[in-house]
Image (cartoon, coloured by chain):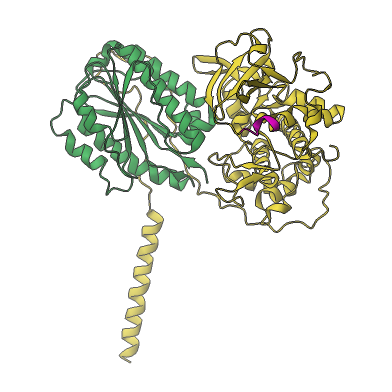
Chain colours: A yellow, B green
Amino acid sequence: MTEPHVIGGADDSAGTGPAADPRGWVLPRTVSVGDLGPLAEPISEHNGQAIAVKPLTNHPGWLAKLYRPDQHPEDAHRLDLLISAPDTLPEADRALLYAGTCWPAARIHQPGNPAVGCVIPMAPEQYRSELRRGKFSERRFVEIDWLAKSDESIRGVGLPSPGSPGRLAACRQLTALAAILENLGLVYSDWSFSNAFWSPDQRSVYLIDVDGCQPKKMPDIHQPNWADPLTPPGTDADEYTDRYRLGLLVAKCMTGRRDAHTFHRVAASPWQEQPAVSEVLLDMLLATDRERRPSAAQLNQALNSGPYLRTVPRPARTELPPLPPQATQPIPRPSTSGHTPEKKPHTPEKKPEPSPAKQPETDAAAGWIVLVVIGLILLIIIASNH
Amino acid sequence: MSLCLPTYVVIDASTSMKPHEGVLNATLARLHYNLATNPRVSEFAQVCVVAFSTDVHVVIPMSDMEQVPAMPEVICGGRTEYGKTFDRVRECIEQDVSNLRMQGLDVLRPTIFFLTDGGPTDARWQDAFRQLVDRDWPRHPHVIAYGFGGAKRDVLEQVATKALFIADGSDTESALSAAITGLLNTLIASSKTGQMQIATDVRGFQYVEVAQEYVD
């Protein structure tokens, strides 16, 4: 990682002789709707701040992301800052950012609306896989959601299981991208299962919706199960919110768990080759002082087998969340063939029904208590009669 | 803690559905595939599938569908007994909510997706229904109803507490498929926000707003 390049006033490079976009975008960084040529049928509609995402017929591999009309007028300036931000990065970081995100290439405008949307690259084909289950199969983008499942579950849909090396490689790239955003002074806020694709074959990740990034702070994008306990509802998300969510995502992807077990698995520090990862993650997730959460770069360094380097004392941490009691769930089996069509309506196999919890131990214990109490009463009566 | 929406897919498997049994099972299998290959949706919306006719059968007990190897097949035939169905679903809810809480989940109000192509053949179904949606019962569910074929609109207007979808004349098989798609879209949208987001645009169905929604 490199020195911070907080963006702000970096808009001079927008449209005034920027470096050629290595991804092959040939038009200027500010384009009118008309400049783009025909737009194909939308591949997505009414998703977040976008009303539609449409492929550019004349520019294969590129998409027009069209925003809702209620965007803030200053959004045009923000988009220009984002588009030009990679120019300030060292070559390696710029290459990583362009390869691992759908970083916007141009702002789209029209008369009366300076920020109709932006041009973004289509996610590479390597992030699509065939997901199979039963007799169904579909080729689609694989969300990083899958990496937060066990290897067995991942194999269950026909994807190659990542194992520890695959999980580590994906999380290294994820944190490297997060560190670049943090160095640029950008808040993403939207770290979650649905905003990154994962390639099991390439062991890589691809971050989407990055055109929503804002400098320093932005409205907190609420997603269930991703709420930062130290960012009160209604307040803005900032770099410290991002650190919590990134830590949560990495913890889930590294462990393949997505419940309270995640934290306990991290605390068990199962990564001998990366001894600092456990402590960095726990500080990100459980620090009582949000501003002392370790940075994305610190986590990235730990994932690369480095030490937990810090310039401030370690934060105090809250306790690990309690684990739920071990619960068993009946798993139905698939049906077998050979039902007689004359059968009365039924399902072919009797499902295991939830059975009431047995309480033999409780009953036995209660019996002993009654006996002891009776014995004590008898002793008192006998003693009082002597 | 993780949020969880206990979801009941309650499907009419009476004699009138017999000609559409193949489509019904294919549609259920597709529902299973779509949930089982979307981890965050299947984690959020734990699902129980119930088929009803003369008797009521729990096809899939409350499960994360990712953990269910395949959807069992339903064989159709028999009467359309609403009352027994509502009684059974109430029992399931009572048990399932306790189990989900035991797993450390934050449990949202259960939701029933009720799919039927006919009216009730039992006379006293209303008693069972009243008990199911009784607001004094803390676990009373929302009911979203999809009616097609010979479904009775006036009956479903009594059953739906959250939303009602009435097929606009499309054939039963298309309606069945569209209803399951609508159900799935509702679960996907709800999983994003952590609260009920009903997909009201269901092809071949008229969306009827429910005037008297039960208060949570």
Q: Is residue A222 visible?
A: yes
The residue sitting at 36% across, 30% down in the picture is A351
- Depth check: give the residue in front, B133 or A305: B133
> Could you say which quadrant of the image residue A139 lies in?
top right
Q: Is residue B191 left or right of residue A14?
A: left
Q: Picture coordinates of residue B134 (x, y %)?
A: 25, 44
Decide which of A252, A80 is in the foreground and name it.
Answer: A80
* Residue B110, horizontal then vertical, whole percent: 37, 39
Q: From the top left corner, tell me how far across and down residue A333 is, in percent.
A: 43, 26
Toward which corner of the image does residue A116 lie, by quadrant?
top right
Query: Farthest residue in the front direction?
Result: A112
Instruction: Tell me what residue is drawn at x 33 percent, y 20 percent.
Output: B74
Residue B176 is inside the magenta segment:
no
Identify which residue, A311 or A153, lies in the foreground: A311
**Image coordinates for residue B13, horizontal then vertical, percent:** 27, 21
Q: Is residue A66 above or below residue A223?
A: above
Horizontally, residue B59 falls left or right of residue B68, namely left
Which stretch appears magenta? Answer: A73-77
Question: How many tags in the picture?
Answer: 0
Q: Farthest left residue? A: B123
Q: Quadrant of the C terminus of chain A?
A: bottom left
Quadrant location of the N terminus of chain A in the rendered image? top right
Image: A345 above or below A378:
above
Considering depth in this image, is A345 or B7 the residue closer to the camera? B7
Dominant secondary-structure state across the stretch colored magenta = helix
